Structures are given as C-alpha cells and as structure tokens.
Image: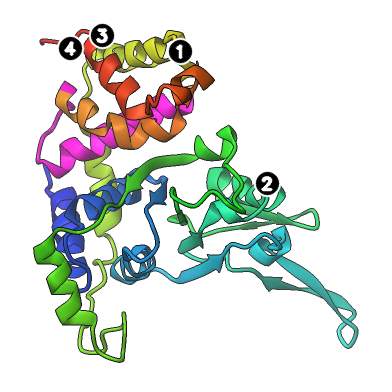
C-alpha cells in the first residue's frame, strides 16, 4: 500500500514547524481534517497563533487564503458576496466575498449573530454558495477553519447545534510549554511581528492529496468496529447527562477520521484505538449537556470518558 498519507502528514508537519512551535498535535488534526474533507473549529484564547497557523497551513497545501473577522454587525453578504448592477453592460456582476477561497479563516465566529453564522451552513455542507438565487461552486477542497475564544462570553452568540455538527473536529489550543514559548520569543520578537520573510514554505505536490485520499479509502474497517462506533453513538443518546447525543453525521465523521489516523500510522485497517483517539476531537463539540450537568461542572470530555468505559472494546 502506498504511503501517500504518511508523506503528506510528514510534509505538512515539517513545513509548519518552520513557523509555529509546539503544535504538532494540532497540525496532525488539521491534516486529518484535510484528508477527510471536513472543517475545523479551533478553540483557544487570543494570542496563541490561530491565525498564523491557518494562514501558513493554506500556504503549505497550496491554497488561496481568506480571512473574515467576525463582529456583531457582520452581514451574510459580507461573507458570500453581492451582485452589483453595471449600467454600461446592462448586467449584474458578482463581487465575490471571502468565502471564495480554498482555506477560509472565520475568526471569532461566535462574535457574529445567528443570521450571519447561518450563511456558512450551505458552504460547509455542499461547498457551494447561493447569492440572489444563483448558485456558485466553491473549490473541491474548500476548508473552513473557525476560531472562537472560550473565555470571553460578553458580546458572543453560542453556535447552534446545526452549525457545530458541520465541523468535523475541534482543536483546543492551550498555552505552550516554556521551551516552545522561548522559541516563539526568539523568532518573533522583532519589529516584523508574526511574519517571517526569511522562511519559504514548500506547497504539497499536486497529486499527493488525492493519492492520500485514495489510500485512506482502501483502509479496511471490520464490522465489529462499525458496531463499536454505533454503540458509542447510541450510548451518547441515552446518557442521563446528555440532552442531545451524537448525530449520524457525527458517527460518519468519527469513522472518516479513524480511517485517516490509521493511514497516517501506516496501517491498512482501523483499530479500536484509532476510534478512541479521535472520539474527543470529533465528538466533544457535538454533545449538548443537560443544565444539571453544566451546573455540576461536568464537561463533554467527562461524558466521553464515561462512554468509553461503558461500551465494550472489540477484541478481534
């Protein structure tokens, strides 16, 4: 079996490590989302390098990068674009919005209202945007990276369940350790800030992504591993501390990510450990806990750990 997935993962890690430090796990999850064809919700306090990571990731995969800074007065047309009438040509011309990109960073997505948030639903699910009843196709590898700050609740709008469910996985960024933070200081303490003119990032080879996806599609999944994922989903739907359990889209996302992880590790089959490793990044943001659970300080990660203890692991 080809090692295209591993080659892709190693290339992205090598190039990204030139500009960001101590984020190997986050980069691996970006690679998983890229190969699986899903979108990513990035959660972390300001100043941890979310924008730097997204911008350079777009460069490494050879895609066009666009950024939206979400505010309370942002309108759907500011994302999708508008039609402008040109009297000289007696026709309407499309002025495309930032959504026409390969990698779209939606910065602080929870600072804009539900109406504007919903403008991303069609683009994330169908990779298509509708403007004034005309539909336009987006790039086949269109990827949304949306960031939100978990510590600041003033002036924010919680993402609805339908929006959260369209993010394949969630990356949680914490503070770097001391060694990596020193490395950041030594690299970016000059007037140029977070821009390194002395570093050139090499994009992926043109067909490597498709080869990796073909390899992932050939990864074998046994029936008992499928059954294991369905049992986990079923347990989430009946858990006393969960008001809204895992959707079928969520189960599919878990399987897709487990496939990619297996391929990145050079395996031709999905093991239960692949499923267990991906359960928190894929499922934690999808679980809606009961009010009592929130009052008791219970988090989605605690529920998932409980589910993993409840459901028997396939042995063969």
Name the residue beneath numbered marker 4.
313
Mark 1 vs mark 3, CA separation in Å:
13 Å
Spot occupied by residue 107 in the image (x, y as percentages of width and height): 50, 61
Q: From the viewer's perspective, is 270 left or right of 304?
A: left
Q: Are marks 3 and 2 in contact (CB under 8 Å)?
A: no
Mark 4 vs mark 3, CA separation in Å:
9 Å
Residue at position x 23%, y 77% from top? 201
Q: Are marks 1 and 2 in contact (CB under 8 Å)?
A: no
Circle 3 crowding by C-alpha within 10 Å: few under 14, some 14–19, many from 20 = few
Residue at position x 33%, y 72% from top? 59
* Label 1 vs 3, first from the N-terminus: 1
Circle 2 crowding by C-alpha within 10 Å: few under 14, some 14–19, many from 20 = some
Spot occupied by residue 16 in the image (x, y as percentages of width and height): 21, 67
Q: Is residue 185 magenta?
A: no
Q: Is 301 rendered above or below residue 71?
A: above
Numbered tag placed on residue 237 in the rendering: 1
Q: Are marks 2 and 4 in contact (CB under 8 Å)?
A: no
Residue at position x 17%, y 21% from top? 272
Element at badge 3?
helix
Residue 246 at least partly seen:
no
């Amino acid at each position: 079996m080809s090692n295209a997935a591993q080659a892709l993962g190693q290339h992205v890690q090598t190039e990204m490590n030139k500009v960001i430090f101590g984020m190997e796990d986050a980069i691996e999850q970006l690679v998983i989302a890229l190969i699986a064809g899903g979108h990513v919700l990035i959660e972390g306090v300001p100043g941890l390098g979310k924008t730097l990571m997204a911008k350079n990731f777009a460069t490494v995969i050879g895609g066009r990068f666009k950024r939206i800074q979400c505010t309370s007065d942002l309108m759907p047309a500011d994302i999708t674009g508008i039609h402008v009438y040109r009297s000289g040509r007696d026709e309407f011309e499309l002025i495309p919005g930032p959504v026409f990109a390969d990698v779209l960073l939606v910065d602080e997505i929870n600072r804009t209202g539900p109406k504007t948030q919903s403008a991303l639903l069609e683009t994330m699910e169908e990779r298509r945007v509708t403007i004034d009843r005309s539909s336009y196709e987006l790039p086949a590898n269109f990827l949304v990276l949306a960031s939100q700050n978990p510590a600041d609740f003033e002036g924010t709008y919680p993402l609805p369940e339908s929006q959260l469910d369209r993010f394949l996985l969630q990356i949680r960024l914490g503070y770097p350790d001391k060694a990596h933070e020193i490395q950041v200081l030594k690299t970016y303490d000059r007037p140029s800030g977070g821009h390194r003119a002395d570093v050139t990032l090499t994009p992926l080879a043109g067909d490597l992504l498709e080869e990796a996806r073909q390899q992932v599609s050939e990864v074998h999944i046994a029936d008992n591993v499928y059954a294991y994922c369905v049992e986990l989903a079923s347990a989430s739907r009946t858990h006393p501390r969960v008001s809204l359990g895992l959707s079928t889209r969520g189960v599919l996302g878990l399987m897709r990510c487990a496939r990619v992880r297996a391929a990145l590790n050079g395996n031709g089959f999905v093991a239960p450990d692949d499923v267990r490793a991906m359960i928190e990044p894929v499922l934690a943001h999808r679980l809606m806990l009961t009010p009592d659970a929130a009052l008791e300080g219970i988090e989605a990660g605690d529920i998932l750990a409980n589910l993993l203890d409840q459901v028997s692991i396939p042995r063969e």
